[in-house]
Amino acid sequence: MTERPADDAWPQRESGPVVRPYAVTGGRTTGPGDGEPLTLLTVLVATGRPLPTDDPARLAPEHHRLLSLCGQQVTLADLAADTALPLGVVRVLVADLTELEAITVVGQRSADQRTGNDVLQEILNGLRAL
Amino acid sequence: MASARSDTHGGAAAVPAFTAHKILVAGGFGAGKTTLVGAISEVRPLQTEEALTTASIGLDDLTGVGAKTTTTVALDFGRITLGARIVLYLFGMPGQERFSFMWDELAYGALGAVILADVRRLGDCFPSVNYFEKRQLPFVVAVNCFDDAPSYDPQEIRQALDLDPGNPLVLCDARDVASVKGVLITLVETIASRRSARAGAASGRIATTRAPASRFGQ
């Protein structure tokens, strides 16, 4: 007869946040693949297109939670902060949602697109007015 | 579906409601990044992953977890809305070398950085200074004035850090909103003046004694 494993053979409850997030993504660390890379300041918004109901097992509660936060335009960083999920996990889940066309990327600046001088001035004015 | 996917949400999504800009807050452990970010905005830590070190393995019982090699780390995160369409994001950038794997992602597209320095542990900010100089990203060194720290002449600190003349060094109190505002303003002014200097040099074909214009960064 097999013995019950000792308690310390199982992941401790405290390691939940370490194990669980990637359980949500099914162990994936990258998204569906094609499509633009999601950076911290990628702006996202819900498209209004409903999530598929035919394969509910595909979607975790975290997918729905993220989607509910995209009613207004938000950045990837905002989503990660609001859900307290690791960035890597949020990136994978958001990629899932963009593939399902439930979320779309609104604006994405490439690295060589600098902030214009006029916007820089606006930032300066805004800071001085704080 | 027969209808095209041009519902109002899809239409509205085409127009960005705001532009997002990033400033990094770097510095060693305990230099005051959390305090600074918290002084000027809401602070909600961003979670990311960190490779487990052998030191932490003894504390976290990983038996049964298998090949798990990362744990979650909280990063300082702040947001300042400036006007109707501009949002400034502050990202804390841990200055310890073991976090260097995440620096590139944090720095991607950033306007510039505030490097917080603690005169009691000045060496802690060397990796950040080196990194931003190498990346040619504009930065300001802000010496956080802790109550029990000896006061040094800013010029002494500049020399200790081997700062280029183009990089400002300012004193600040990370707890004070007005002081933090001043640091951010200094940074953005530095970025703006560097650009006009570069533009002026380019249009007037002024020869400089410094290395090529790209040395000054974005």
Image (cartoon, rainbow, N blue to C red):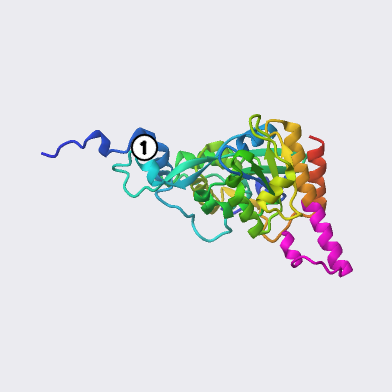
Q: Position of residue A119 (x, y in %)?
A: 79, 50
* Residue B71: quarter of image: top left
Residue B173 or residue B47, whichever sits in front: B173
Which residue: 82% across, 48% down?
Answer: A121
Name which residue type carries label 1. Leu
Residue B202 highlighted magenta (yes or no): yes
Q: Which quadrant does the C terminus of chain B fall into?
A: bottom right
Residue extending farthest to the right is B204
Q: Residue at x 82, y 67 (%)?
A: B208
Queried whether the magenta region covers residue B60, the answer comes back as no
Q: Which residue is mark 1?
A: B59
Position in image of residue A10 (x %, y %): 28, 38
The answer to whether A109 appears left or right of A29 in the picture is right
In what element is the residue under mark 1? loop
Give the residue at the far left of this rendering. A1
- Seen from the viewer's position, the closer of residues A130 and A96 is A130
Chain assignment, label 1 = B
User: Nearest the camera: B135 or A119?
Assistant: B135
